[in-house]
Amino acid sequence: MLFTYNEAIEKCGSAYKMSQDINNKKIFKLEEGIYSTEENVPEIGIIMKKYPKAVLTGEYAFYIHGMTNLIPDLYDLATPSKAAKLKDNRIRQIYVRDDIFPLGIEEKEVNGITVRIYDKERMLIELLRNKNSMPYDLYKEILVNYREELNRLQIWRIQEYAIRFPKSKMISKALDVEVM
């Protein structure tokens, strides 16, 4: 189980008891401000605990949703447009307009860790919006996987998301031409 510094102190009873628990290996300091009852925790768990309001998006979200086998080098985290800069070299921060930031957020279990991630429908919109900024081979691989999954997606949700985004006509046209 993961804890922030304050949660770890609360669990242990005091900062002194927490330092003793760390020395006795009852609790482990994984990195600054992040503690765990287990010595080895997936990196995604540490990142999600460290940035609980952020949402997984981009290439890492496609990987988690099974749309690609390529494991990205960086975790793409979406934050509201006025959020503070995340200073972590494992992360690529993506600022999202406040009105569209919450669309499609879901919680998903990944390697025993609960993560906030955009749903597959939202990620299809993101794919179409950002196709020029990703490698063509990756774009095509993900697009083919979406075509195979089309009957399992909630089309109404995709349409609802598409009209809320800037350049909604371009997104709708791309949906019709490239996906449907």
Image (spheres, rainbow, N blue to C red):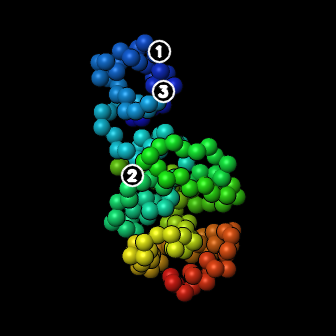
Check disc 1 and give the amino acid type. Answer: Ser
Q: Residues within 10 Å of mark 3 (few under 14, many from 20)?
A: some
Q: Please state the horizontal and vertical placement of residue 58, each as a whole percent of the image.
A: 49, 61
Helix or strand or loop: what does disc 1 sit on?
loop
The mark lying in front, picked from 2 and 3, is: 3
Q: Which residue is mark 3?
A: 5
Where disc 3 sits, the SS reads helix
Q: Vertically, is 35 above or below 87?
A: above
For disc 1, the marked residue is 14
Cα separation, mark 3 vs mark 1, equals: 11 Å
Write the residue at 42% across / 48% down: 90
In the image, what residue occupies the spot 56% across and 56% down?
94
Measured along the vertical axis of the image, is residue 174 above or below residue 107?
below
- Decide which of tag 2 and tag 3 comes sooner along the chain: 3
Question: How far is mark 2 from mark 3, CA to CA?
Answer: 23 Å
Question: Which residue shows up at 38% across the image and 65% down it?
Answer: 66
Mark 2 element type: strand
**Disc 2 marks which residue?**
110
Q: Label 3 sits on what residue type? A: Tyr
